[in-house]
Amino acid sequence: MYERVKMLVDNNISLYAAHLPLDIHPVFGNNSRISDVLGWESIEDFGKYHGMLIGKLFRFNKPKKINEIAEEIKTKIGGEPVLWPFGKAEIKSVAYISGGGISMLNQAIEADIDCFITGEPAHSAFWLAKEAGINVIFAGHYYTETLGVKSIAKELKNKFKIDTEFIELPTGY
Ligand SMILES: [Zn+2]
């Protein structure tokens, strides 16, 4: 651990790290930011993780195609979304959980959602999705979890006049 933070210690730089609290934060969180970034209105919280709802649920008046959604993600978040187009061609409902939400795919299936969006795929979820006939989009664990970090940076700049810089370091997942 010392080797990892040595550069910060040597240069008198503070470190603040957050994962789940930044996923779930109602204003700056990775999940709540997705509505603004994609310009979709979230109607409900979705996806129970350790007793807390961490994701978002969207319903569209005008249905979207899976490729259309993937294109929106690609232009507004970045990365190369991976598609499992196993469900309806006309998508009216989307459940979204940033990062490692694939373990919660069953909740989207039970809620009869047309498309589930999360960060990274899992081999073990492939047949579950295919047999249930649900569309899944993997927008990248890295990319879906840059949104909260960027919103915190913006807040630091606006509220505390602190210069910020986002360092792009994609992991490929
Ligand atoms: Zn994560």
Image (spheres, rainbow, N blue to C red):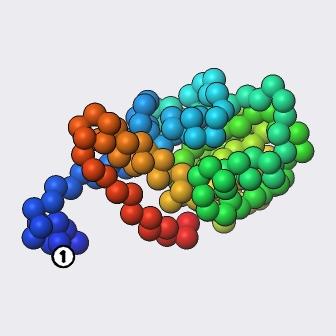
171 in relation to 163, above or below: below
Q: Residue at x 71, y 48 (%)?
A: 72
Q: Is residue 126 visible?
A: yes
Is 111 or 154 nearer to us in this picture? Answer: 154
Tag 1: residue type?
Glu
Dot 1: element: helix
Residue occupying the far bottom of the picture:
3
60 in relation to 94, above or below: above
Q: Residue at x 81, y 25 (%)?
A: 61
Is 2 or 72 nearer to us in this picture? Answer: 72
The quadrant of the rendering that contains the C terminus is: bottom right
Q: Position of residue 171 (x, y in %)?
A: 49, 69
Instruction: Say which quarter of the image contains residue 60.
Output: top right
Q: Residue at x 68, y 59 (%)?
A: 81
In the visual, does 122 lie left or right of 83?
left
Q: Badge 1 local density, few (<14 within 10 Å), some, or many (20+)?
A: few
Residue occupying the far right of the picture:
89
Which residue, given by chain and number where applicable, does mark 1 sit on? 3
Q: Position of residue 46 (x, y in %)?
A: 58, 32
Q: Position of residue 23 (x, y in %)?
A: 44, 43
82 in relation to 4, above or below: above
Q: Position of residue 130 (x, y in %)?
A: 81, 55
The residue carrying mark 1 has its beta carbon less than 8 Å from ligand 1: no
Is 64 or 85 nearer to us in this picture? Answer: 64
Instruction: Say which quarter of the image contains residue 125.
Output: bottom right
Q: Is residue 2 visible?
A: no
Q: How many marks?
A: 1
The quadrant of the rendering that contains the N terminus is: bottom left
In the visual, does 79 lie left or right of 166?
right
